[in-house]
Image: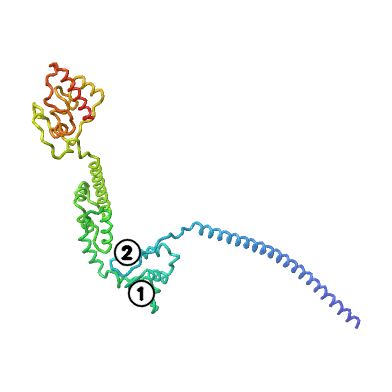
Amino acid sequence: MESVSKQEYMRVLSELDMLSTKFVALEQENQRLLGDLQQVSAEKVQQFEELSQRVHQLEATLLQRQAVEVQTSPKEPKISLPAKFDGTRSQFRGFLNQVRLVIKLHPSRYPNDVARVGLVGTLLTGTALAWFAPLLEKHSPLLEDFEGFINEFQANFGDTDSMRTAINKIRRLRQGDRPASAYAADFRLLACDIPWDEAALMDQFRQGLRNDVKDLLLTFHDDPKSLTEAVSRAVRCDNRLFERRSERQQMLRFRPTETYASVVTTPPQVSKSSYVEGPTPMEIETTRRRGPLSDAEKQRRRANRLCLYCGGPGHIAVTCPHKPRRQVNQVSAHENPISISAPPSRNPSRPSSPCHKNSFDVLSQLDDVLNE
């Protein structure tokens, strides 16, 4: 009994030793796994912290970029809405183009079809508003389809045969007294609805130009290659003609049209003694006046008893044969207070009397005043 118990005791003790060894091994494995877990946990924590910092940095960068975009983004321009459309067919195209321009410049204000149709509806009046009212009251699907609404709108108020209308208008279109740029603008607007090629459009454009512009276009040695080039040449020629007309008007504005000799339209009757004997006076253009004489030249002519008008001897400026007769008549009838019975001698070598000398001095002074 005791021996069995001892054997049993030894077996149990041996099992305990084995269990103790296994426990120690498991404890070591547990410590190892715990160490590995701590190491992995530390790495994961570090990675998590790095990822958190990265996320915060990205959020800050995104917020900064959004703020910069808000500050630097261009603001929508302030524009006035087009005038209300009352259904006039000739104004439909311009009204529709202005509406499209407003929508393009304000995309945030009219982001969808409902807002765009609403914009058109607020700009209608008269017959056009009467057409729009049933669509709004019956909640038509066209209110949510902008392009479909525009097609229906154009079918009611636009030109249903725009091509034929444009062809008839462009054939009757002429420049007239307008600038070539205004004529070209109307021509291009009509050309949008005509399926002609460039050659046909250029030929029709040239036919509508004014004759003087056509003549100046002949100075170009080659033909235009496109309608744009043809328009550019015509506008350039028209601008040159306008500048030339302006220069001519400026020259005529400052050209003297009335002279001393042309003031009196009906000259008075003058006796034959007012005319000077001798050869026929030289015809001088009455629209031009002789320039003023210098003081030295006047003194020289007085000292040599020469005419203050032509510089010749034997007469004075009042009776100068080189002056037009109308000017002589006018001066003798209105400006000369001294009665002249006979011209002075043509021979400067003949001695003159003191009375005749005094008369000549007085007349010379009068000539000087009249020729100032």
Q: Which residue is mark 1?
A: 132
Quarter of the view holding residue 173:
bottom left
**Dot 2 alpha-carbon crowd within 10 angstroms: few under 14, some 14 to 19, many 20 or more:** few
Mark with earlier residue (1, 2): 2
- 114 left or right, relative to 332: right
Q: Which mark is residue 94?
A: 2
Kind of residue at badge 1: Phe
Residue 313 vertical position relative to residue 74 in the rendered view, above or below: above
Q: Residue furthest bottom?
A: 1
- Between 47 and 228, the one nearer to me in the picture: 228
Q: The C terminus appears in which quarter of the rendering?
A: top left
Residue at the image point whose x is 44% and y is 60% from the top: 76
Kind of residue at badge 2: Gly
* Image spot of residue 138 (x, y percent): 38, 79
* Image spot of residue 226 (x, y percent): 26, 54
- 224 left or right, relative to 348: right
Secondary element at tag 1: helix
- Between 43 and 203, the one nearer to me in the picture: 203
Quarter of the view holding residue 16:
bottom right
* Image spot of residue 9 (x, y percent): 87, 78
Q: The N terminus appears in which quarter of the rendering?
A: bottom right
**Dot 1 alpha-carbon crowd within 10 angstroms: few under 14, some 14 to 19, many 20 or more:** some
Secondary element at tag 2: helix
Residue 133 vertical position relative to residue 191 in the rendered view, above or below: below
Residue at the image point whose x is 21% and y is 46% from the top: 219
- Between 200 and 102, the one nearer to me in the picture: 102
